[in-house]
Amino acid sequence: MLEFFQDPYHVFEVVSSVVLVLILVADLLLVVKRPHVPSMKEATLWVVFYVSLALVFAGILFAMGDAEHGGQFLAGWLTEYSLSIDNLFVFIVIMTGFSVPRKYQQEVLMVGIILALIFRGIFIVAGAAVIESFIEVFFLFGVFLLWTAWRQAFSEEDPDSENGLIRILRKRINITEEFHENKLRVNIDGTKYWTPMLIVFIAIGSTDIMFALDSIPAIFGITQDPFLVFTANVFALMGLRQLYFLLGGLLDKLPYLHYGIAAILAFIGVKLVLHALHESDWFPESFRHSVPEISTWTSLGFIIVSMLVATIASLIAMRRAEEKPLHRD
């Protein structure tokens, strides 16, 4: 135990983990103690603060002389942040679809973020254990990410449609048509009813599980260090609540954003397959050494370029749509 704390990197892991947990608890208490809809200025300041915090964290890794871990964290954080923004878009669809009162959306978002952190934590632990004993699982992860990338780019699923569990619940239990403040259950004329808030929480939770299934293989394609995997996910989820109110209706106006995310997932899927080919004992050593490996810096560059291209293309499309003259009959 003493040798563990003599290593500066291990001390940094413990201290930074404690600090991150304290920040998350403080953010939760802020919602509980002072629920409100943040102004654009307040939301912007919080988002800038959390992004700066992630960059400071990466800077500390570089300052400790660990450029490889610093690069892995940056690539992992950017990947998880892009997926979290996609997750945020679905949150917006759910809030709008169920007409959640704006003053209660902060609480719903905080629950969604906590559930996302819990599910991702479970998958991180499980994924690390599987990888440790069976590196060939990267083949499965890679194929899964390639399929997810195709679905992200070309699927025509309706995001407003309810999943099967919610449809079953509507048929089996009493649910009120309107919200009753932020309550989950109410008593009306002596009969117990669930409120639509229950459906919202189930929709948010099931969405979190789906995105955790996408994001954990993606981050393991960049780094297998459980600490970096965890911190990249925590930093990606930090500020997501404020980002929701900052972006508002903007996300659905970025028509090419999902293509950028799809490109990142496909790239990491290919990287995972190549890494599995390089490391697996299933193949002759001569073949394994001939398989190219994609470096952390190549991954980081591809992620940045993909998101920039998708965002710029979306902004150009938005401007052209606004400048297009109206046609009169």
Image (spheres, helix red, strand yellow):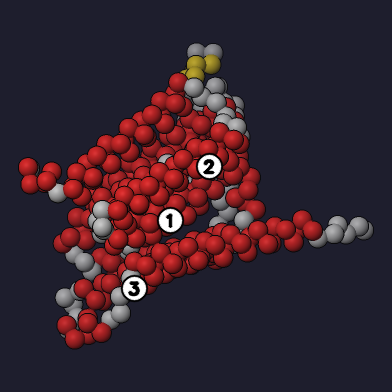
Residue 14's image quarter? top left
The numbered dot on residue 111 is none
Looking at marks 3 and 2 on the same chain, the residue that comes earlier in the sequence is marked by 2
- Circle 1 is placed at which residue position? 78
Residue situated in front as seen by the camera: 59 or 230: 59
> What amino acid type should be assigned to the residue bearing mark 3?
Ile
Q: CA distance from mark 1 to mark 2?
A: 15 Å
**Measured from the top left, where is residue 91 in percent x and y?**
52, 43
> What amino acid type should be assigned to the residue bearing mark 2?
Leu
Residue situated in front as seen by the camera: 55 or 65: 65
Residue situated in front as seen by the camera: 278 or 154: 278
Q: Quadrant of the N terminus?
A: top left
Q: CA distance from mark 3 to mark 2?
A: 32 Å
**Measured from the top left, where is residue 132 in percent x and y?**
17, 60
Q: CA distance from mark 3 to mark 1?
A: 17 Å
In this view, 127 is above or below 175: below
- Circle 2 is placed at which residue position? 243
In this view, 134 is above or below 186: below
Circle 2 Cα neighbour tier, 10 Å, few/some/many (<14 / 14–19 / ≥20) = some
Q: Quadrant of the C terminus?
A: bottom right
Residue 318's image quarter? bottom right
**Measured from the top left, where is residue 10 in percent x and y?**
18, 47
What residue is at 38 percent from the left and 29 percent from the top? 26
The secondary structure type at the circle numbered 2 is: helix
What residue is at 44 percent from the left and 23 percent from the top? 32
Q: Which residue is at the far top?
A: 190
- Circle 3 is placed at which residue position? 294
What residue is at 34 percent from the left and 48 percent from the top? 57
